[in-house]
Amino acid sequence: RHCSNLRGYGVGGYLMRLSKDPSVVGQYDIVLTYADHQAEEFFNRHGFTDDPIVTARHKKQADYWENSTLMVYIPPYSTNCFGSLKSLEEMNDQLKKWRVMSMAAHCEQVCIMERLRQEILVLQSRLSSQQEVIEALQKELCDSKLANRVLQVEFDLYRQQNQAKVLRLMEERAKGWIYRIEDLESNRRDDTEHQTNTSPDDKTKNITLETIEGVVTPPS
């Protein structure tokens, strides 16, 4: 960083190749670095990766640096063992481990998806049952509204019929009272005419009319 005048001469690449050479630094599993944002391209050219899946398991093995990116270099098998047979055996062992771990991860993912599917089915059944309840309540509400309308119509008809009956009864009573009043007036006129046509002696023999609420009774 402080030797900008030496850039472009291959010094950094030469030092990087030496730092990755097992004959120089010895056997190693990985190389970790926090690369400056401006140097990420340089480390990418030399085999480093910032893949989050690869770097996730190594975050606790290196101190965190601000304004930088954690990058990992994983060497090939040939650098870890002297001899192609051991390198091949190590590669096969890691492939077997990878296959087992992949199957376990796949089984776990399938289990998670199956749980999610069952959860969706349960939620759908609950939703459908709630929908049935809502539809039943809506139907009951419509039936109640219809029943209320029928009762209102019946009540209005009953009230109209009662009003007509009351009016007829009042009319009949009024006619009855009119007839009674006319009878009383007629009796009074007849009595007056009879009194004017009879002598004083005959007046004492006339019967006395006493009317109580329109009823004519003979003298006691």
Image (cartoon, helix red, strand yellow):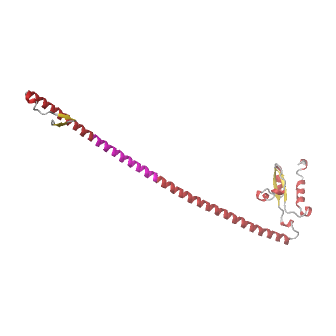
Q: Which SS type dominates the magenta stretch?
A: helix
Judge whether residue 135 is colored magenta: no
Of 111 and 65, nearer the camera is 111
The residue most toward the right is: 24
Residue 206, image x, y percentages: 11, 32
Residue drawn at point x = 46 percent, y = 51 percent: 141
Is 148 in the magenta?
Answer: yes
Say which residue appears at 8% left-offset and 30% top-offset.
202
Give me the residue at 61% from left, 60% from top.
119
- Outermost residue on the front side: it is 220
Range of residues picked out in magenta: 140-168
Residue 96 location, quadrant: bottom right
In this rendering, the count of numbered labels is: 0
Q: Would you identify the image quadrant in which residue 191 lies?
A: top left
Q: Is residue 24 left or right of residue 180?
A: right
Residue 186, given in percent of the width and then of the height, sits at 15, 33
Q: Is residue 34 visible?
A: yes
Foreground residue among 63 and 39 = 63
Q: Position of residue 23 (x, y in %)?
A: 91, 64
Work out which quarter of the rendered image holds the C terminus and state it.
Answer: top left
Report x, y in % for residue 208: 14, 33
Q: Is residue 90 above or below residue 6?
A: below
Q: Is residue 3 left or right of residue 57?
A: right
